[in-house]
Image (tube, helix red, strand yellow):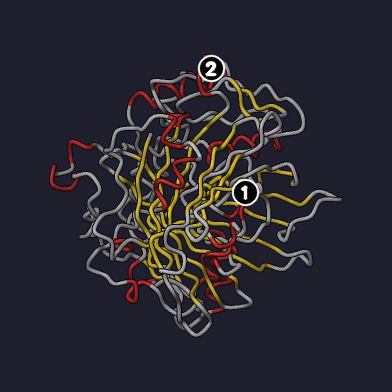
Amino acid sequence: MLKKLTFAGSALALALAASSVSHAAVSAQDAAKLGNSLTPFGAIKEGNGKDPSSPEGIPAWSGFDKADIPASYTRPGQHHPDPFAGDKVLLTINAQNVGQYADKVPAGVRAMMETYPDTFNINVYQSRRTTSAPQWVYDNTKKNASTATLGASGVTGAFGGIPFPILNGTNEEKALQAIWNHILRWRGIYVVRRASEVAVQRNGSYSLVTSQQEVYFRYYDPQLSEEKLDNIIFYYLSFTTAPARLAGGAVLVHETLDQQKLPRQAWGYNAGTRRVQRSPNLAYDTPIAASDGLRTADDTDMYNGSPDRYDWRLVHEQPVEMYIPYNNYRLSNPDLKYSDVLMTGHVNPEHSRWELHRVWVVEANLKSGQRHIYARRTFYIDADSWQIAAIDQYDSRGELWRVSLAYIKNYYEVPTQWTALETFHDLRARRYHVQLLANEESSTLDFSQATPGDQYFHPAALRRRGR
């Protein structure tokens, strides 16, 4: 039944962490570096020493001061004016010159240039390190650095902030910590979003599926604590509004931290039968119907779910400099139509923005005896925000098959770093899936509404909201 419903991309999924307990807390001396030589989230604070107005420069981090943003820019739910609209393209990387920049461009992005040599390129702009969060999130992150532990069933000793801002331990432990940092990254407390998703076919045709999603990130609710989470990290509620054949369908997810103690719980509402039914656990490589098979359950939010089927490693012991999508306000500009954004094969590169940033590169290799359609995955994680920006995904023959991209931007009214669009590309089929389209909607993410109580996310809410 769930295949008839839309499981939208803002749904996150938390999971098991490692098979053995790891004490990952750092010393008080190292934690004191946060906010000093390191950013509050653990990235290198200083620039790379090159001209920050050039395509090779990374500036020092200073965050994004809301005081610098006009009040008219920060009305709840409105589309975001681009604060860097005056920036110019400094470099265009395409199929002809990508060899010069191979060490700074993810392998999947290079493969997209090879697949679409006449249409796909990346326009590089001045790097703007806009990642920012409220001070209380920074304070919690600093506390977590000295208390968070990566264990057999998840993360303990962390609440309300990045759990592992300073990676510590063995190579595998550091890799898993980086993935957990992505899963538990800051994105507000309660958010409402109305958006569409599409599967763009080889000939460029597509059909919209529109839904409203509501997410209550209990892990970040300052009224709670680690002890009061009751093993629930977030609630997610989505109901489909279009097309007519799917309208009224809804899905509810209760995401748990310790999934050995209690697996993720999900329910679906079918508008035709008016029945709420328990849905099977969506995990691993279960295909998501709304994506026309182009996105798996654990592709959602770039990566979610139990990492127990993979062996994990950091490819580099330190972040490396790479071009990734960043500050992509233009892609959600309400002056653009969906047809302006969606091209055959990929989104229109004219409207996307790429910048040079420090990136953690994490590789996952499928364990012997386990199954998944992806035998290997390479994740490129923005060191400033812990948001996965790009993923290379390989099949059982070791061949690059799929590429995922998160077009990052800052929601400066919160403030928080999240995505304007997420895209999932099948290089062989030459089809791709896009989530979070909102150009033609009257509003974008609304972080201003009061957090509803737990009862709002009771399974009975599906019937109420699906009518």
Of the numbered discs 2 and 1, the one sitting upstream in the chain is: 2
- SS of the residue under disc 2: helix
Query: Does residue 354 appear in this view?
Result: no
> Which numbered marker is on residue 227?
2
Please state which of residues 365 and 89 is positioned toward the viewer in this rendering.
365
Q: Is residue 372 visible?
A: yes
- Residue holding disc 1: 279
Q: How far from the left and from the top, in percent, is residue 465?
A: 39, 48
Residue 387 is situated, as x and y percent measured from the top left of the image, at: 48, 45
Question: Relative to residue 120, is residue 389 depicted above or below?
Answer: above
Q: Residue at coordinates 58% horizontally, 37% vertically from top-left? A: 180
Task: Give the residue type that dot 2 points to.
Answer: Glu
Residue 461, position as x, y percentages in the image = 44, 42
Outermost front residue: 273
Whether 148 is drawn above or below 311: the answer is: above
Q: CA distance from mark 2 to mark 1?
A: 28 Å
- Which residue type does callout 1 highlight? Ser
Q: How many marks?
A: 2
What is the quadrant of residue 89 in the picture?
Answer: bottom left
- Tell me the quarter of the image containing the N terminus: bottom right
